[in-house]
Structure formats: C-alpha cells, structure tokens
Image: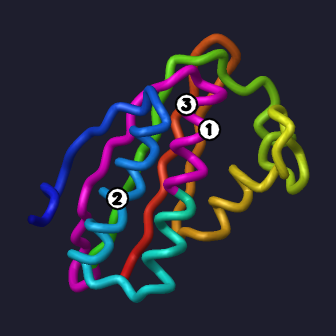
Amino acid sequence: MAPESTGTLPLASEQHIVASRQTVRALCQTLRFSLVEQTKMVTAASELSRNTLIHGGGGRMHWAVLEEGARRGLQLRFEDEGPGIANLDLAMSDGYTSGGGMGLGLPGSKRLVNEFDIRSAPGQGTCVSIVKWR
C-alpha cells in the first residue's frame, strides 16, 4: 500500500527512525526515483531522523509529495523542540560533530538532496527541510 502524499511520523525512538526510513523508501518508490536517488534520500532521512532524536530529544518528520509543472519531488521536514544549534556555520562544516560521530550528518545530508534548509537557534529547536526532485 502506498503512503499518503502528506503525513507525519513521530521521532521518539530507534523504531521510529526505522519507520522513517521505510516510509521514505516507499514514497521514493511511488515517485519512481531511481535506486541511487532512493538511497540518497533514505540516507539523508536516516541521518536527519537520528539527529532529531539524539540532539533534539525527539520530534517529528513531515513529508509531502510535490508537483511543480512536469516534475515531482519529495519534501521532508524534521522538527524538534530541543536545545537548538548555537553556531549553524560550524554545524554545517565537514568534520564537525557535537556527538562523537563522524561529523557527516548535516553537510552530508545537504549533498544528497536538491534543496536543503535549516533553521535553528539556541533554546528554539531545529527545523531541517530537504527536497529531492525526480
């Protein structure tokens, strides 16, 4: 069964991260993304879901299937009410990590998609929006 063209998933546990990957893969398949494009979008969604859970204390993933003329795409938005990011420029630099990881999450995710937007401020949570067009 194909997922709805818009929806929301909670991101409050490891199981929710798995569900977010499965949902994104199903949406990409519905949009007839190539296997490479599916993998890129699922990888970005996995990284951003994990960031939402670990750094933001949990939140939500919203999705929307987009149509713009003849092209179709998938928008994902990850929101949390966590501590926010004090220095976005630093967080978006390759190799920076605040959690002991490899530091590829945000900048790596940005490279995998066509559009990337991040909004965050200390004490105000974080919202990351990505779009992949077919």
**Residue in view at x 60 percent, y 70 percent:** 112
Instruction: Tell me the residue that label 2 is attached to.
Output: 22
Asked whether the residues under the numbered discs 1 and 3 touch, taking CB atoms below 8 Å apart as contact, a structural biologist would say yes
Q: What amino acid does circle 3 point to?
A: Leu
Q: Amino acid at mark 2?
A: Gln
Task: Give the farthest residue toward the right.
Answer: 95
SS at mark 3?
A: helix
State yes or no: residue 46 in magenta: yes
On the image, the x and y values in percent for residue 1 come to: 9, 65
- With 18 as the anchor, is 65 left or right in this view? left
The quarter in which the C terminus is drawn is bottom left
Residue position marked by numbered label 3 in the rendering: 53
Q: CA distance from mark 1 to mark 3?
A: 5 Å
Label 2 vs 3, first from the N-terminus:
2
Residues shaded magenta: 45-71
Q: Residues within 10 Å of mark 1 (few under 14, many from 20)?
A: many
Q: Residue 51 bears which disc, if any?
A: 1
- Position of 51 relative to 40 (above/below): above
Q: Nearer the viewer, residue 71 or 58?
A: 58
Direction from residue 1 to residue 55 in the image, left or right = right
Q: Assign a secondary structure to mark 2.
A: helix
